[in-house]
Amino acid sequence: MTLILGIETSCDETAAAVVENGETILSNVVASQIALHAPYGGVFPEVASRAHIEAIGPVVAEALEKARVPLDDIDAIAVTRGPGLAGSLLVGMNYAKGLALGADKPLVGVNHLEGHVYSLWLTERDEPVRFPVVCLIVSGGHSEIVAITDHGEYTLLGSTIDDAAGEAFDKVARLLGLGYPGGPAIERAARDGDPQAYTFPRAMLDEGYNFSFSGLKTAVLRAVQPPHDGKREPKGEGLTPDQLAPGVNVADVAASFQAAVVDVLVHKTVRAATEYGATEIWIAGGVSANQALRRAMTERSPIPVRTPPLSLCVDNAAMIASAGYFRYIQGYRDDLDLDIRPMWPLLSIKDAMRREGA
């Protein structure tokens, strides 16, 4: 039995978890900062890092207590190294280093995107996973399609060239005055709307596997704002209902926008899975909680689709502990001088070890 303590502070959730053998969650504690950032319509980095400092100690203590595992029984400590907000990452990294030094435990730095992939490893399944699989990682900061040929073996097929899908959800929700976080707000509004009411663009639909959602966001802006006087460009901060263009139905806009995002994500992912001979499609990250995305992917995919439970879609430490376990059993260790990597790409374990000189 191998026990991994996971720590995650890449953005606006302070999280800690204990996972057994990379698959069994013994505890998974998440302290959310949504209420702190809601007034800004997005994550305020300085506020996030200060909140992490206050929460990290109690969250880790609670995770160990709920798992009924003393720190002495932990085999290794896995911590998010990147990508993410620098100030937030530093809080988790320094706390993990302190625990590793004080308790004489190995330290394993984990890529946040790899953590999202391993949220699928913590779900129940009827049959063992057969590689290769194709994973769509969609969140507030990331939209990637990754081919996975084995544990820790990744090939990046495509990524966003501008806004990530979750970022577009947040910006459009703010534009429509629907609040933060944008993903759930758009999804709620879309339930009462017509997804065909507006014909929004599906950018780069058949051009490789990269994504672009900036033009879609601008198209929504043009559709809902009243004509401006030509002297100044409309901005796109949140609008009130009386500031929308005449005849605009927010539910229809939300549904049409959501349909455009889902179409692009599903089309490119299914095409990638077909081309690379995948046995399954996985969806991970915050936007994987979107029910329209789940339904469309399942309906249009010729192979099984696996999604995490809603509790593992958001940033959490169980996924970091699971990813850390598979790195740990392959001999991956990090020194206590480990640096954060705010812009860290997703690398295969062998490539990561080679770059680190391991």
Image: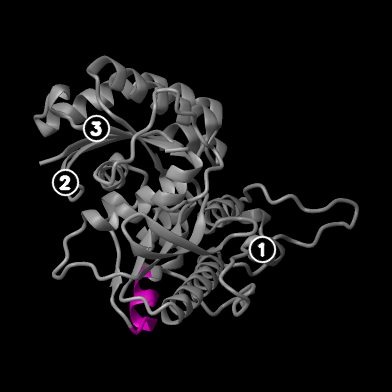
N-terminal-most mark, 1 or 2: 2
Say if 154 sits above or below 55 in the image: below
Q: Which residue is mark 2?
A: 21
Residue situated in front as seen by the camera: 270 or 193:
270
Q: Which residue is mark 3?
A: 76
Q: Tell me if label 3 and label 2 are in contact, CB under 8 Å.
A: no
Q: Which residue is mark 1?
A: 224
CA separation in Å, label 3 and label 1: 52 Å
Decide if residue 262 is on the left or right side of residue 343. Answer: left
CA separation in Å, label 1 and label 2: 51 Å
Tell me where residue 233 appears, x and y as whole percent: 82, 53
Residue situated in front as seen by the camera: 69 or 30:
69
* Magenta span of residues: 294-302
Say if 125 sits above or below 63 in the image: below
N-terminal-most mark, 3 or 2: 2
User: Can you tell which of label 1 and label 2 is closer to the viewer?
Assistant: 2
Tell me where residue 314 appears, x and y as whole percent: 36, 48
CA separation in Å, label 3 and label 2: 12 Å
